[in-house]
Image (cartoon, coloured by chain):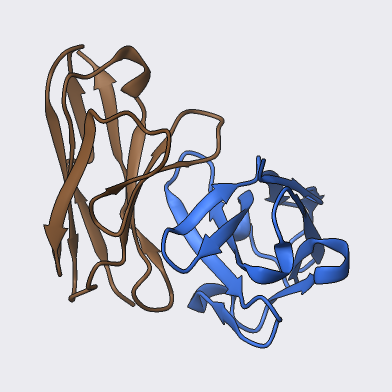
């Protein structure tokens, strides 16, 4: 199975900061990379699909980039509602695999 | 509006069985791949299985192969996960989700808790 390694596993930041989260795949996954946000007790929410496409309704402060094995999620100008856990997911080959998650906390 | 409602979670003993259900509305269910994802308490997300719109293809994570079966009833807009020989490490919130060709795993149910314990 393809391993997805996220870094960092946790991150402290302040409102207004810019943060980046990285996801590395153990092999090339083309463009089949999504990013999700999850808040405690809630289902995940799709933010980004196909590496860099913003899901409808997601604020433009979220952006993403990357290719093949290295992918980056960036949040520009953190808002209070952005403090959550973020996951990447590869849908290139079965079994689909998630990164282990990055918990974004308020500094 | 896409809506997915998960149900069927319960406390079950090791070795036991359980059937989870997910009822879909707001979209043509029979046209979409559907997926189960789980999350153990305090842990990350794990993709479990998915199924083709007509039910003819199914894929599973290795840890559940031979124990779990994904199925669907398109006439009832319903997705199922039959879980047998349950183990303590199957304890998790189970989410159903819609899986599209372009966007991938997108809309999610609210989740249903399965606890495997004696």
Q: Quadrant of residue A60?
A: top left
From the image, which quarter does the C terminus of chain A lie in? top left
Q: Colour of chain B?
A: blue
Q: Residue at x 65, y 64 (%)?
A: B87
Whole-percent x and y of residue A52? 23, 51
Q: Is residue A77 visible?
A: yes
Whole-percent x and y of residue A43? 55, 39
Q: From what the image shows, is residue B96 above or below residue B82?
A: above
From the image, which quarter does the N terminus of chain A lie in? bottom left
Q: Residue at x 16, y 26 (%)?
A: A76
Q: Residue furthest bottom?
A: B56
State the residue in front, B50 or B63: B50
Left or right: B43, with B60 as reference point: left
Q: Residue furthest right?
A: B76
Q: Quadrant of residue B53?
A: bottom right
Q: Residue at x 41, y 64 (%)?
A: B102
Q: Residue at x 44, y 45 (%)?
A: B43
Whole-percent x and y of residue A79? 28, 15
**Tag count in the figure?**
0
Whole-percent x and y of residue A21? 17, 41
Q: Which chain is brown?
A: A
Q: Is residue A72 visible?
A: no
State the residue in front, B16 or B71: B71
State the residue in front, B105 or B92: B105
Q: From what the image shows, is residue A63 above or below residue A93?
A: above
Left or right: B73, with B101 as reference point: right
Q: From what the image shows, is residue A82 above or below residue B78?
A: above
């Amino acid at each position: 199975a393809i391993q997805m390694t996220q870094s960092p596993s946790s991150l402290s930041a302040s409102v207004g900061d810019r943060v980046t989260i990285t996801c590395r795949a153990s092999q090339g996954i083309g463009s089949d990379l999504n990013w999700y946000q999850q808040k405690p007790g809630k289902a995940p929410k799709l933010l980004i699909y196909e590496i860099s496409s913003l899901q409808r309704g997601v604020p433009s402060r979220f952006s993403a980039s990357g290719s093949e094995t290295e992918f980056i999620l960036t949040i520009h100008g953190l808002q209070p509602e952005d403090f959550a856990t973020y996951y990447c997911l590869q849908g290139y080959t079965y079994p689909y695999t998630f990164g282990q998650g990055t918990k974004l906390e308020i500094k | 509006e896409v809506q997915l409602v998960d149900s069927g979670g319960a406390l079950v003993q090791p070795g036991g069985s359980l059937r989870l259900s997910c009822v879909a509305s707001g979209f043509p269910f029979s046209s979409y791949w559907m997926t189960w994802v789980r999350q153990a308490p305090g842990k990350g997300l794990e993709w479990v299985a998915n199924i083709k719109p007509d039910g003819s293809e199914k894929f599973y994570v290795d840890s559940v192969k031979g124990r779990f079966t994904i199925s669907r009833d398109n006439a009832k807009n319903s997705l199922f996960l039959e879980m047998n020989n349950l183990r303590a490490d199957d304890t998790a919130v189970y989410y159903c989700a819609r899986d599209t060709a372009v966007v991938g795993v997108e809309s999610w149910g609210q989740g249903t808790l399965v606890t495997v314990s004696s």
